[in-house]
Image (cartoon, coloured by chain):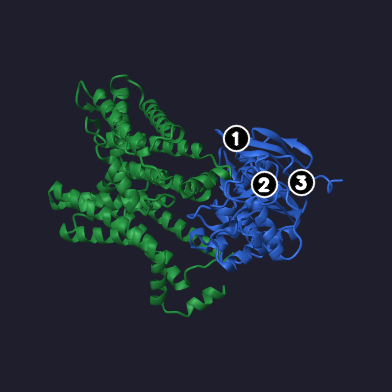
Chain colours: A green, B blue
Amino acid sequence: MARVNKSEEMTLIQDAMKVFQENIREWGMYIALLIIMIIFTITTKGVFLSSRNIGNLINQTGYIAVLAIGMTLVIIISHIDLSVGYLSGFLGAVAATAMEFWNLPVYVSIVLVVILGAMAGFLTGFLVGQMKIPAFVATLAGWLGYRGALQLVTMYRGTIVITNDVFNAIGNGHIPDIVDLDILPGVHGFTLILGMLVILFYIFSAIKQRNRMLYHNFKVSPMHFFILKLILMSALIGFIAWILSGYRGLSWTAVIVIVVVSLYHFIMTRTNLGRHIYAVGGNPEAAQLTGISVKKITYIVFCSMGILAALSGILYASRFKSATTTAGTLFELDAIAAAFVGGASPSGGIGKVTGSIVGAFVMMSLTSGMNLMGIDISYQYIVRALVLVAAVVFDVATRNRKKT
Amino acid sequence: MAEKVPVVEMRNIKKKFGGVEALKGVDLVLHHNEVLGLVGDNAAGKSTLMKILSGAYIPDEGEILIEGNRIHMASSQDAHKQGIEMVYQDLALANNLDVVANVFMGRESISLKLGPLGVMDEHHMEQETKRLLNRLKIDISSVRLKVESLSGGQRQAIAIARATAFNAKVTIMDEPTAALSVAAIGKVLDLVKELKAQGNSIILISHRTEDIYQVSDRMMVLRQGRKVCDTPVTGDIDTFREHVVAYIVGARDDFAEEGSKRSNGKGK
């Protein structure tokens, strides 16, 4: 408590500077996203921030975001997975084949693909965890193998068109508007109300957490700064909900991403499994000596990666209502970039699920914004490369500064 | 009765690595609430012997008795079950985690079980960590600090605290003072004394004879895979040091008649 009182005497600006310096890595990411969005909003004369474009952006980010979450876990345990792009494309094609040629029901197809994803992840886990093959090599083999498999599946027709409406709704549909707001015609009322609920829940849990930390004599940010943060975050959530409700509302892709993020965030921060994953990333020998099975954790992380690759494949195939021979190309690199931009450390042990989502939005905002501006694809790659390098350099620089 | 039975007894332990005999039949006794200093030159077999006791290696021959019961240990988990904990020289801490997470690594308190997952009881773990550090008089400003931001001495203290956190009967410390500053060495030795005062039995491996002299009740010297000395720590530091060095380099050997003829004969 003493510490809080002392800091309350400081001015708001000093507080802000202090909090900013302490969390510079995390804030840097949000600020980067904000700057990117502002630049594109200006250069596209507001088109970037239109309801329609933001809705599209979220749906586009979805299939990279789920991969980035799995990749963050892989990077935390100091491995890498290069195979997930084509694995995702291959599994999307299997889903399409299952529905269109084997006439399997949509839910059976989805379950089948998720199981195949888990098996693929298990195989990688076996090569990396059991056979001790460097993940880079093992998953490079996967990259080649799944690319071949994707071409095999799509060999006869080139593109498999998916006609199932339920499946296609995953990547294109929106949640139904069950609340009709007469005062705001053309606005998705249910999305707006959900946004309000999220704000209330956020404020409630933030206050609860702050009180708990005060109770345990933890260092907390000063009161006025806390209130400022609450207002800013609430405004942000409200703004996103408002934008989304302007064009068809919350998409099913967004719902899926929110569920996956929440689940993984919970696992990584609150459960012993998450703690063990961080421990293995921080010091595998130490983890092994305290009774954590590094092998088991490796299997679990790669299986989760495989399942999320399946989910990514489903989202992508559904969004384009088809499976193509090039589906999944370079997804793995977008996911890896998203994880690094989102604060995962190349040396392992560090990374956040929530960060990887922000990273995915940074990478996809760049793509989307530059597409809107009509920038040539070759320059797009160079810009994305620079952003990735900047993120890692920033990461290394802030980390070294903290140590001295 | 329980006081008479040694907490650890190792009999005629032999271990070969390929053609090299690392241990040629070593006996070791550790009594209740005793600090045993284990000394020896590089490759004398100290670490091998302790890795056998902590379950990391399986001996080729010989037996291990814990409180009089013959035990077979095939893994460090088996050793944990027997209450034997080892603090490794290279600090088995995860730098990316905070003090609480490191102390409870691998045995997190669970407040709610969700199938194979367990929701961690952070509050309980934190209280327990604070209590543990207080009990051992370890001074750290916050148990939520990441281990990477702590000093070498503090990190060693955390590693030792973790080993003793779960009712260990025997704590083995492998060179706990290596690579520490003088002030930090003093703190670690105080911690060893504190642990003894609280009833722990400790085996301390060190090449610093001053450390052994300060905290040990008894010391044992290994040379080329054999025990050459097993004696209470007495007298002043200079004679003690001379004494120990004589055994380490092989000028003296109390157990020469049992061992190989290669050693330099019995000194007296």
Q: Residues within 10 Å of mark 2 (few under 14, many from 20)?
A: few
From where the camera sits, is residue A163 visible? no
Residue placed farthest to the right in the image? B1
**Camera-side residue: B12 or B96?**
B12
- Residue at image position (67%, 55%) is B246
Residue type highlighted by circle 1: Lys
Instruction: Give left or right: position of B1 versus B144.
Output: right
Determine which of the numbered discs, if any, sits on residue A137 in the image: none
Q: Earlier in the sequence, mark 2 or mark 1?
A: 1
Residue highlighted by disc 3? B7
- Disc 2 sits on a residue from what chain? B
Residue highlighted by disc 2? B264
Tell me: residue B48, above or below residue A94. below
Residue highlighted by disc 1? B16
Q: Earlier in the sequence, mark 3 or mark 1?
A: 3
Horizontal and vertical percent for residue A354?
Answer: 40, 52
Q: Earlier in the sequence, mark 3 or mark 2?
A: 3
Q: Nearer the observer, disc 3 or disc 2?
A: 2
Q: Nearer the observer, disc 3 or disc 1?
A: 1
- Residue at image position (70%, 65%) is B237
